[in-house]
Amino acid sequence: MNRIFHARVPWYTILFLILLAGITIWSYWERLGVVALISLLWMVVLIERTIHTTYTVTTEGTLVIHRGRFSKDIVIPLAEIRRIELIRSARIGTVCMKRYLLVHYGEDHTLSLIPTREEEMVMYIKEKRK
């Protein structure tokens, strides 16, 4: 049975969406049609990518990263994964500004993932690799 992990929406993505919405509204107000159209399209792509990003561990032993309808899926065999690191960036008090999983696979490939439950995903992948 395939196991699906959903992506977490980081605070900086929400902040960027608010900024893009402001630029879109301002450009419509000032009648800058091309700027409004570009910012609106960018907002649609970003929302689509944010909402539909999933990480699926399949029964065939692969990790499938689906980043929405406008992006190509990335398929990584679990046997190629060398290590997974939980990266935490600068902290303000007890709050971590950025948290993500850094997946090392193949020869020199790395990929960052932001699942909602990082530790659970790491444990599940390690269990599936054995």
Image (tube, rainbow, N blue to C red):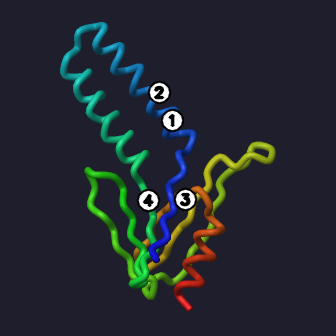
- Which residue position holds label 3? 115
Nearer the viewer's eye, disc 4 or disc 1? 4
Please determine whether, in this image, residue 116 is positioned above or below residue 9.
below
* Quarter of the view holding residue 73: bottom left
- Type of residue at label 1? Ile
Q: Is residue 74 left or right of residue 118?
A: left
Point out which mark residue 18 bears: 2
N-terminal of the two: label 3 or label 1? Answer: 1
Mark sitting earlier along the chain (4/2) = 2
Instruction: Please give the residue where the numbered disc 4 appears in the rendered image.
Output: 54
The answer to which of 121 and 98 lies nearer the viewer is 121
Q: CA distance from mark 4 to mark 1?
A: 18 Å
**Is mark 1 in CB contact (under 8 Å) with mark 2?**
yes
Secondary structure of the residue carrying tag 3 is loop
Q: Nearer the viewer, residue 82 or 8?
A: 8
Three-letter code for the amino acid on which mark 2 is drawn:
Ile
**Residue 13 in sight from this viewpoint:** yes
Please identify the residue farthest to the top as the structure is shown. Answer: 30
- Reading the image, the residue beneath label 1 is 14
Q: Quadrant of the image for the C terminus?
A: bottom right
From the viewer's perspective, is 42 left or right of 34? right
